[in-house]
Image (cartoon, rainbow, N blue to C red):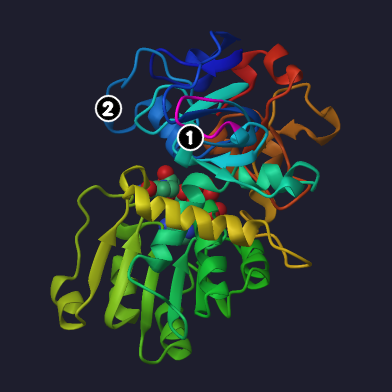
Amino acid sequence: MRAAWYERRGPAREVLVVGDMPTPEPGAGEVRIRLAFSGINPGDVKKRSGWQGSPMSFPRVVPHSDGAGVIDAVGPGVPADRVGEAVWCYGAQSYRAFGTAAEQVVVPAELAVPLPEAALSQPGLLEQAACLGIAGITGHRAVFAAGPVAGLDVLVWGAASGVGAVALQMAHRAGARVLAVVRRAEQLTSVRTMGAAEAWLADDPALVEQIRRAAPEGVHRVAEVDFATHIDVNAQVIATGGVISAYYSSAERPEIPYWKLAFADVSLRLLGSDDFAPAVKAAAARELTAVTTPAGTDRLLTLRSGQRKRNITPNGYTPALCRPAPALGRASQAAHNGITFMPAARASTRSARYCSALFRSDASSMWL
Ligand SMILES: NC(=O)c1ccc[n+]([C@@H]2O[C@H](COP(=O)([O-])OP(=O)(O)OC[C@H]3O[C@@H](n4cnc5c(N)ncnc54)[C@H](OP(=O)(O)O)[C@@H]3O)[C@@H](O)[C@H]2O)c1
């Protein structure tokens, strides 16, 4: 099969290779998926670039944990009738070497989550499902780890992001009132569209007052994209007994206002999605699938909003939709260093379609 891989850490254009490698065979309890889309996340980029100095876990890594496609083979112990099933998967490159940046991937059967047959014909649904894994499961846990949120006030930081957008929408669907914070003005509209009752800019000098006015008793849950930067604001707006669930911190050893948090009986949850219990991931996966593949006229979960949709595509794939990263704005340019992106025509994001054009392309121009 064709695949992209790296055998040492470094920038994408220096270490990523595209080539042929043996097609993996599913072992006991595993399935093989022929991928339609591969989902990419910041964590994939961090693993490849050697974030925090961690060593290579395997001699060769095919990146990306998330994807969607159709099961084309099953190993011993897996019902044969799963062949032909449309699925999305998560965890493909979590404690495993070969992820979804390939034409096929093998995963434990329980990580291949069934989609309705309609997924194969419904435009955008497979692509959407390929983006559910890391962002979806993390966003779900950031909201629900401490229990149901119906009737509660949930504050979502970075609510236009991959994780934040899921947290926002899942909380809203579950009956919470969602208060959103974003960094850019154009994101205010999109997060309101996704269900935020109120939305503010992170640098609003009156942010604390605004949140307190909206939630006079304080917010009950916080889904946090940068624990270190926001802990002082959170300490001022959290309700007694509230829970701050953080999935990232820009500082490894953040200072916290200990007594302010303690006097409010606050719980801090620090999330690492690779290491959520299997049952936690499976429960989140079920709920995410249910809202992503609704019956009738219900809307799909919007996995990302606005300007920064980042469908990655090689130069040459659907050229009409391609434009260089700088056109997508400063943040994208900085993060992705001039690699070509396809602005999403739909709500789904962060997926790369595996087509022959992709594998004909020069690896140095393809990947984050
Ligand atoms: N612990 C885990 O298991 C886990 C799981 C998933 C993700 N993560 C980490 O969480 C981070 C976000 O992941 P993602 O997939 O959501 O990324 P993403 O889609 O690239 O989004 C990042 C978003 O967060 C916003 N943001 C970042 N810092 C912010 C701040 N200080 N205040 C307000 N907004 C802020 C960004 O705003 P702008 O648009 O203005 O740049 C952007 O919208 C990454 O660092 C990722 O590695 C951790």
Question: Does 192 appear above or below 335?
Answer: below
Q: Which residue is mark 2?
A: 54
In the figure, residue 255 lies in which quadrant? bottom left
Q: Is residue 323 visible?
A: yes
Question: Does 83 appear above or below 216?
Answer: above
Give, as a three-letter code, the residue at label 1: Ser
Residue closest to the eye, 156 or 115: 115
Q: Which residue is mark 1?
A: 65
Other residues around mark 1 within 10 Å, as few (<14) / some (14–19) / many (≥20): many
Distance (Cα) linking label 2 and label 1: 18 Å
- Indicate the position of residue 88 as horizontal and vertical percent values: 58, 41
Residue in view at x 50 percent, y 50 percent? 135
The magenta-colored residue range is 74-80
The first of marks 2 and 1 along the sequence is 2
Classify the position of the N terminus by image quarter. top right
Residue closest to the eye, 202 or 320: 320
- Indicate the position of residue 303 as horizontal and vertical percent values: 61, 54
